[in-house]
Image (tube, rainbow, N blue to C red):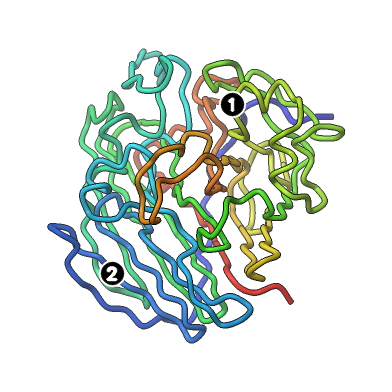
Amino acid sequence: MPPPLLTLKMQPTSVMTTKPSILSSTAHADDQVYTLRNAQDMCLTISERGAALVSWWAPDRYGRVADVLLGYPDAHGYADNRYYFGAVIGRWANRIAQGRFTVDGEALQTEANDRGNHLHGGPQGFHRARWQATMEDGGVSLRLVSPDGDGGFRGKLEVQVHYRLADDGSLTIAYEAVADAPTAVNLTVHPYFNLNGGSADVGDHMLQIDADYYMEIDQSGIPVTVAPVGGTAFDFRQPAAIGPRLAWPDPQIQLAGGFDHCYCVKPYNKGKPGPLREVARVYDPGSGRQLQVSTTEVGLQFYTGNALEGVHGRATRPYGRHDGFCLEAHAYPDQVNGPYAAAVILRPGQVYRQTTVYRLGLIQ
């Protein structure tokens, strides 16, 4: 049986520990940028603007180093960041239908910024805020206080995100949040990956997602039902190249201009987050680089950069459609309007916790 639509209940999870990295900081215009390095010649930079992952330099099978993240050429892009490159998303990742929901009988209207819906915290969401960063615990911790009424959400929310890079190529991202009033919380990070370092689009990347079901969407990107992946373009239970699937005559692919859908990653367990587990793998045959994604969350949004055409990033040419992909771990889209909406409401005295790990390495 498919899982019911939009269910989740937050539970505390333990934070994965890793070997400390070498860390330094530099100025990036008016924003500070922090650099994590490991023993594998990886170099990861993080900006306090949006708590964004700016770049991740890593070697390929021949020892050639390239940046596997898409991003802007300078700090001005991150100050606006309309494409959410690398940023932490909040208070609500993904979409809320018409930006409306209720908490304890109180009707709330959040900012609508995507086809009449609320998307990624609204136009002034966490992705545009300047976070306060400190070097601690072998990595970087970034903190943000979101005031009552921010983006239409109630209550003051205090958020912390901790990044740590290990020598095995694992980037652990641990989130915590507390609130002084009941409020909807759903956080994620939004890096665009291209494992060939930008030499081509991501069409030849081999993707595997451990999910039997995904969420079909309507024309505005809101999920309408949970559907089995079997026999569809969405079946990545066995590794498959992304490019050919983009060309399938699937109504859902045509509706989104590619993939922009949430997968119900296993184990489902009635929508509750569970222990940290691997849920997806991506392999680039040309470079030999492989990305593994582990998370405590039940939803994984797969996005193929459908709106990247003409975006001026760090490449010598403007980005093209499908030049990058995103795998964003979070609760289900529009869950605040589903039958289990209470599960994504953070209340005073509770702590929101989430852990997601991106492990970058070479295929064995």
In the picture of the structure, the residue carrying the numbered disc 1 is: 256
Looking at the image, residue 168 lies above or below residue 282: below
Q: Residue furthest bottom?
A: 39
Circle 1 packing at 10 Å, graded few (<14), some (14-19), many (20+), is some
Q: Position of residue 258 (x, y in %)?
A: 62, 33
Q: Amino acid at mark 2?
A: Tyr
Q: Are marks 2 and 1 in contact (CB under 8 Å)?
A: no
In the picture of the structure, the residue carrying the numbered disc 2 is: 34
Q: Quadrant of residue 156?
A: top left
Q: Position of residue 15 (x, y in %)?
A: 50, 64
Query: Is residue 119 or residue 272 the one in the foreground?
Result: 119
**Could you tell me which secondary element the residue under label 2 belongs to?**
strand
Image-based side of 282 in relation to 191, left or right: right
* Foreground tag (2 vs 1): 1
Sequence-first tag of 2 and 1? 2
Quarter of the N terminus within the rendering: top right
Determine if residue 339 is in view: yes
Q: Residue furthest left?
A: 30
Query: Is residue 272 or residue 99 the one in the foreground?
Result: 99
Q: Position of residue 197 (x, y in %)?
A: 51, 63
Quarter of the C terminus within the rendering: bottom right
